[in-house]
């Protein structure tokens, strides 16, 4: 029993010691309790067949970025951005449905003018800021501390050599670490993220990396599986089925006593694969104002107006999004982009879609893709060992029954 809670107790004690009480209270008041209620409301809407609205919105505020990473789906050199009025409207509409947690992505979201003002204005919400960390100066970190409702999630894609290769720039790892240390200095609750590919697997899927990130002050570590999409996809970097299984076993084992919280969004408490888009838990809003099924499928039929006041109506009546939720769930429990891109293209061609990127080549990219291993491991499942993680996955995130 004690072992099952070791990881969360370690993390909680460290956050208690290094984070100001005001920020801890903001995390509890703005993130923990509202999200429990929000997830309950979402499940009830789904059961009763009420008009659809996702539990969470992931929002890419801009295509602009100061790096040009290989394997990124964002258009290099892209300049599309949401307006402040649209971003403000997205948050207001979401709050009407009880949703007060938002993932803020880019490009590099810290290049979006007015973002800090949005955080301050919506002081009753909580924001996860997906960033490469290179623009997270001491001054920016202190502004986030003043707001009190932001958790930076800093992407570390490998150690020195691999970070420079993946980011196609120099000294990226050390520049990112300076952002990490600015967050710790400001007392923020923050995390690190890693998109695991063949080149960084051995470096990052390790106890050493967990302890390294924990020593730097991170409260959580979020592991993704590399998805070879975009104009510079590098499918040869996709994980093998054996490596994906190894990643799952690693997460399940290390969750028992890791010095921080280990997060994934790929498996439920029984080890069954899941897709956030297919469950309806989360959809993505692009810098062009498009409502997308997920961030890597950059085609849409539904676009926000100038202040996003049409968002509720679009979600409730989108034939594209409802059709994709239903059809993707019937096709795979994993990621259709990886498992069956040919079927994905067939599904997409059923709708009058517009591309949402600057580069204008998304459909051609999907047509050139081929099947690669995804995270569906049926019938050899690896269930969660940790009781608190089982509870969280069953009740807080993944108990939707979206797959029938």
Image (spheres, rainbow, N blue to C red):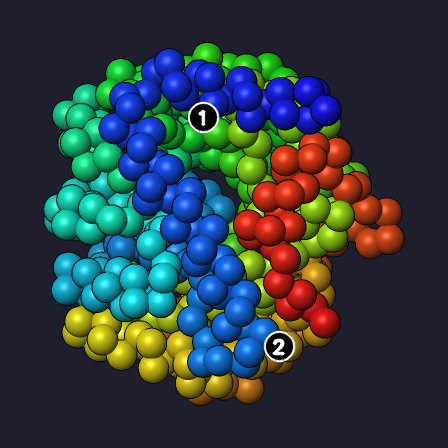
Residue at image location 67% in from the left, 41% down from the top: 390
Residue at image location 63% in from the left, 25% down from the top: 5
Vertical comparison of 148 with 178: above or below: below
x, y percent for residue 98: 36, 62
Secondary structure under badge 2?
Answer: helix
| Residue 183, quarter of picture | top left
Quadrant containing the C terminus in the rendered view: bottom right
How far apart, in angstroms, are the residues tagged by discs 1 and 2? 35 Å
Spot occupied by residue 105 in the image (x, y as percentages of width and height):
34, 49
Label 1 sits on a secondary structure element that is loop
Name the one closer to the observer, 223 or 240. 223
| First reached walking from the N terminus: tag 1 or tag 2 | 1
Q: Which residue is mark 1?
A: 219
Q: For residue 326, which numbered disc appears in the image?
A: 2
**1 and 2 marks in contact (CB < 8 Å):** no
Between label 1 and label 2, give the one nearer the viewer: 1
Q: Where does the image place residue 262, in percent across and percent down from the top left? A: 57, 32
């Amino acid at each position: 029993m004690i072992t099952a809670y070791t990881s969360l107790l370690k993390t909680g004690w460290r956050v208690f010691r290094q984070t100001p009480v005001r920020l801890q209270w903001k995390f509890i008041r703005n993130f923990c309790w509202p999200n429990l209620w929000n997830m309950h409301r979402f499940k009830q809407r789904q059961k009763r067949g009420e008009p659809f609205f996702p539990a969470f919105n992931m929002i890419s505020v801009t295509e602009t970025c100061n790096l040009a990473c290989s394997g990124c789906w964002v258009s290099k050199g892209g300049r599309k951005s949401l307006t402040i009025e649209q971003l403000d409207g997205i948050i207001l509409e979401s709050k009407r449905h009880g949703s007060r947690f938002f993932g803020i992505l880019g490009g590099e979201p810290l290049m979006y003018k007015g973002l800090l003002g949005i955080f301050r204005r919506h002081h009753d919400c909580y924001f996860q800021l997906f960033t490469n960390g290179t623009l997270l100066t001491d001054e920016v970190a202190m502004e986030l501390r003043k707001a009190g409702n932001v958790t930076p999630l800093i992407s570390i894609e490998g150690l020195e050599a691999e970070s420079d290769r993946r980011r196609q720039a120099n000294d990226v790892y050390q520049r990112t670490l300076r952002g990490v240390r600015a967050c710790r200095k400001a007392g923020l609750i923050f995390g690190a993220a890693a998109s695991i590919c063949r080149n960084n697997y051995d470096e990052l899927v390790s106890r050493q990396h967990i302890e390294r990130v924990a020593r730097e002050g991170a409260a959580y570590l979020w592991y993704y599986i590399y998805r070879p999409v975009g104009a510079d996809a590098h499918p040869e970097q996709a994980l093998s089925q054996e490596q994906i299984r190894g990643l799952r076993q690693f997460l399940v084992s290390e969750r028992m006593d890791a010095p921080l919280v280990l997060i994934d969004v790929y498996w439920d408490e029984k080890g069954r694969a899941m897709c956030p888009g297919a469950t309806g838990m989360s959809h993505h809003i692009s810098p062009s104002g498009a409502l997308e099924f997920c961030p890597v499928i950059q085609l849409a039929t539904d676009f926000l107006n100038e202040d996003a006041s049409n968002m509720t109506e679009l979600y409730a009546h989108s034939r594209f999004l409802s059709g994709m939720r239903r059809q993707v769930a019937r096709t795979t429990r994993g990621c259709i982009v990886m498992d069956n891109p040919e079927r994905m293209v067939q599904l997409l061609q059923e709708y009058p879609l517009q591309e949402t990127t600057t580069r204008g080549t998304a459909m051609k990219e999907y047509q050139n893709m081929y099947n690669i291993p995804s995270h569906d491991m049926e019938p050899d499942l690896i269930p969660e060992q940790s009781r608190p993680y089982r509870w969280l996955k069953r009740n807080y995130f993944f108990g939707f029954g979206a797959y029938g």
